[in-house]
Amino acid sequence: MQILVFGAGAVGSLIGGLLARTHAVTLVGRDSHMRVCEANGLDIRGEITEHQTLSGTTTQTGHEADIALITVKTFDTMDACTALNSCEIDTVCSLQNGLTESTLATELNAPVVAGTCRYGALQPRPGVVKCTGQGKTVFGGYTERAGAAAECVHRAFREAGIHSSIADDIRTQQWEKLAINAGMNATTALARVKNGVLANGTGNELAQAVTAEAVTVAQAVGVDLSLSDVTHELDTTITQTAANRSSMLVDVSNDGPTEVDAINGAIVQHAAEHDIDAPRNETLWRLLTLWERNHH
C-alpha cells in the first residue's frame, strides 16, 4: 500500500518506519529530519532496532495514498486538513492525542478511522528515531461506512508486523487514552519530571485524581469506562514509561505550544456541557494555558 504519514515527528516517524517494512511510505515533516530520511532512510533504535528505506518530504500537498496517517499535534489539525484536501487519499486515520476525529470528518471527504497508539518515541537527531515503548494500537471506524476503512488500516499494520486490533467501540479506547494522558501529561509538564515520578506519593495521587475526573466525564457523555480499569492502566503506563518524558513535558522544555487544550481542556469543556465539575483538570489546563501565553 501507499501510506502517507502526515506530521512525522517521533511517533509518526516510528510508525512510518515500521510500516515501511512492507509498504511504500512517505513521511511529511520538518526539513532537516525529512532531508536525511529521503537521502539515507530512517534508523530505528531503542526497543526496536532496524533501518528502513522510505521517502521524506516537507511538501504537504499533492500526494496520493491509500492511507494517510495523521500524527500532527492537535493544534495543527486544521492546517493538515487544508493540505490533505489537495491530496488523493482513500482513507484517513488519526493517531493523534485528543478527540480530533470530528474535525477530520467535517473537513475531509475520505472515510475517517479513529486510532489510538501507545508507542513511545524520541527523535534524538535527524534521520533517527528511538522506540521507548511498545503498546497497543487500536482502530475503529469513526464516520459512517468507515468500518471497511478501519479493516484496511488494521490489515496494513498487521502486514508490517505491528500488533493492532479493531475495537467495537473506538470511543472507549479514545477516552481511556485521553484520561491517562490527562493524568500524566500536564502533571509532568508543570512539575518538570519524568513519568516515573508519578508512580507513588503525591504525584500518583494527583495523576489518579485527574484521571478519575476524566472517567466521570466520559461516563457522562455515554462512554462505558471502568474507573478501576483505567486507573490500573494509568499505573501500568507510568511504570512502563518511567524513564520517559511525556510529550507535553518535551513541548514545555522546548518552549513550544502544548496539547493541553485538546486533553485537559477538552475534559473541562465536556464536563461543563454536562454540569460536572472537573477542578483538577481545570487547574492544570489554566496553569499551562497561562504558561503558554507568556512564552509565545
Image: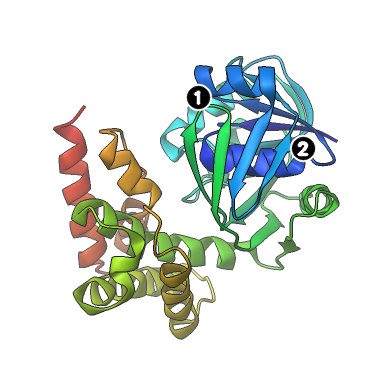
Q: Residues within 10 Å of mark 2 (few under 14, many from 20)?
A: many
- Closest to the camera, between mark 2 and mark 1, is 2
Residue 194 on image: x %, y % = 31, 58
The structure residue drawn at horizontal position 50% and vertical position 67%, both measured from the top left corner, is 176
Quadrant in which residue 8 is drawn: top right
Q: Please report the residue visible at 73 percent of the width from the left and 50 percent of the height from the top.
A: 144
Mark yes or no: residue 105 visible: no
**50 horizontally vs 288: left or right:** right
**Residue 155 visible:** yes
**In this figure, which residue is indicated by the disc labeled 1?**
79
Mark 2–mark 1 Cα distance, whole angstroms, equals: 25 Å
Residue holding disc 2: 20
Residue nearer the viewer, 103 or 242? 242
- Viewer-side residue, 6 vs 196: 196
**N-terminal of the two: label 2 or label 1?**
2
- Amino acid, disc 1: Asp
User: Please, is residue 192 above or below residue 10 in the view?
Assistant: below
Q: Secondary structure at mark 2?
A: loop
- 286 over 227 or under it: above or below: above
Q: Which amino acid type is shown beneath numbered disc 2?
A: Ala
Residue depicted at x 46% and y 80%: 232
Q: Position of residue 227 (x, y in %)?
A: 43, 81
Q: Position of residue 23 (x, y in %)?
A: 83, 37
